[in-house]
Amino acid sequence: STMDVNVPFPFVVQGRTLPAGKYRVTDDAGRIELRGKKGTHAELYLLTIPASGRDPAGDKPALTFVRDGNEYRLSQVWESRNYGRDVLGR
């Protein structure tokens, strides 16, 4: 599945800082690709494992972040209420 998201702040994922902007997130059986859109130059494949719990946004696809001092780290990718992935190497 694919979702388009707008992240309003810079964030860190797997040791790399990405700028605020629009991203396309594609999940192919747990292999997640994060690709920048409209001037946001980034392309990453995320190492993930199945997440426990429920999507904090309800039934809407969502990214979740953990604040670490002045940084935000991508922590989870949720496609639906019951299907999410924990990002490794935050």
Image: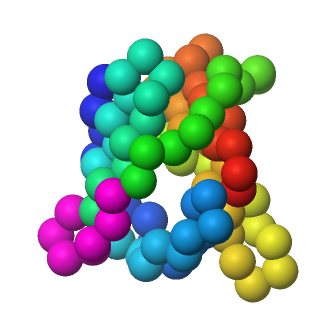
User: What's the residue at 41%, 53% (across, down)?
Assistant: 44
**For residue 74, side relative to residue 53 (left or right):** left
In the displayed image of the protein, which residue is found farthest to the left? 38
* Residue 39 position in % (x across, y down): 19, 76
* Residue 37 position in % (x across, y down): 21, 63
User: What's the residue at 49%, 23% (across, down)?
Assistant: 30
**For residue 26, side relative to residue 87 (left or right):** left
Residue 4 shown in magenta: no
Of 53 and 13, the residue lying toward us: 13
Quadrant the C terminus occupies: bottom right
**For residue 36, side relative to residue 27 (left or right):** left
- Secondary structure mostly seen in the magenta stretch: loop
User: What's the residue at 33%, 35% (across, down)?
Assistant: 26
Residue 56 appears in the rendering: no
- The colour scheme applied to this rendered structure is rainbow
Question: Quadrant location of residue 58?
Answer: top right
Question: Quadrant location of residue 69?
Answer: bottom right
Quadrant the N terminus occupies: top left
Residue 42 shown in magenta: yes
In the displayed image of the protein, which residue is found farthest to the right? 69
Residue 21 appears in the rendering: yes
* Residue 56 position in % (x across, y down): 66, 36
From this view, report whether residue 20 is shown above or below residue 44. Answer: below
User: What's the residue at 76%, 68% (across, down)?
Assistant: 67
Of 28 and 84, the residue lying toward us: 28
Q: In the image, which residues are magenta?
A: 37-43
From this view, report whether residue 23 is shown above or below residue 38. Answer: above
In the displayed image of the protein, which residue is found farthest to the bottom? 70
From this view, report whether residue 30 is shown above or below residue 7. Answer: above
